[in-house]
Amino acid sequence: MAKAGGDEAARREIENLLDAFGRALENRDPAGMLEALTDDDDVVIIPSEGVDANVGRKSVVAFIRRLETHPRRYGWRWTERRFVVHGDVASFLAMGREVVEEGGRHWTQPYCLTGVAVRTAAGWRLQMLHASEEDRPTPHQA
């Protein structure tokens, strides 16, 4: 479910962009993740694990490259998403579960992602992602 205020076409485009980023994350596709992000030094990713902030293109690229070989594989299953568009800037909230696989074990945990998207010459791109998780994993079958 996607709810919010503002431009409906822009909300759909941002929702599709967030889905594309999520697919790239789950497939360990750094190029796909980077394609969804702005390519400037204002880009920020704050992951759910720890309190590190990856600020700027160089730091974000290094973080995404580490995900490619990280022992854990991540995916998202959203139950609610909200988008608010104001001109060329949008904010969003996505809530659901993070699906994690490591060493043959699979689990899910409550997950929340907030962010900002901006309209660029190339279309909408993600400018900032800030994730949080609740450390109460629920084992499940893959």
Image: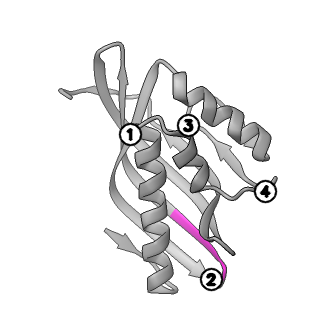
Q: Is residue 89 magenta?
A: yes
Label 4 and label 2: CA atoms lie apart by: 21 Å
Q: Residues within 10 Å of mark 1 (few under 14, many from 20)?
A: some
The answer to whether one can see residue 52 in this image is: no
Q: Residues within 10 Å of mark 2 (few under 14, many from 20)?
A: few
User: Are the residues at dot 2 and dot 1 in contact (C-beta closer than 8 Å)?
Assistant: no
| Dot in front, 3 or 1 | 1
Q: Earlier in the sequence, mark 3 or mark 1?
A: 3
**Residue under numbered circle 3:** 48
Three-letter amino acid code at the position of disc 1: Gly
Q: Earlier in the sequence, mark 2 or mark 1?
A: 1
Three-letter amino acid code at the position of disc 3: Ser
**Which color scheme did the rendering employ for the protein?**
one colour
**Residue under numbered circle 2:** 86
- Describe residue 134's horizontal placement relative to residue 46 as left or right: left
Three-letter amino acid code at the position of disc 4: Asp
| Dot in front, 4 or 1 | 4
**Residue under numbered circle 4:** 40
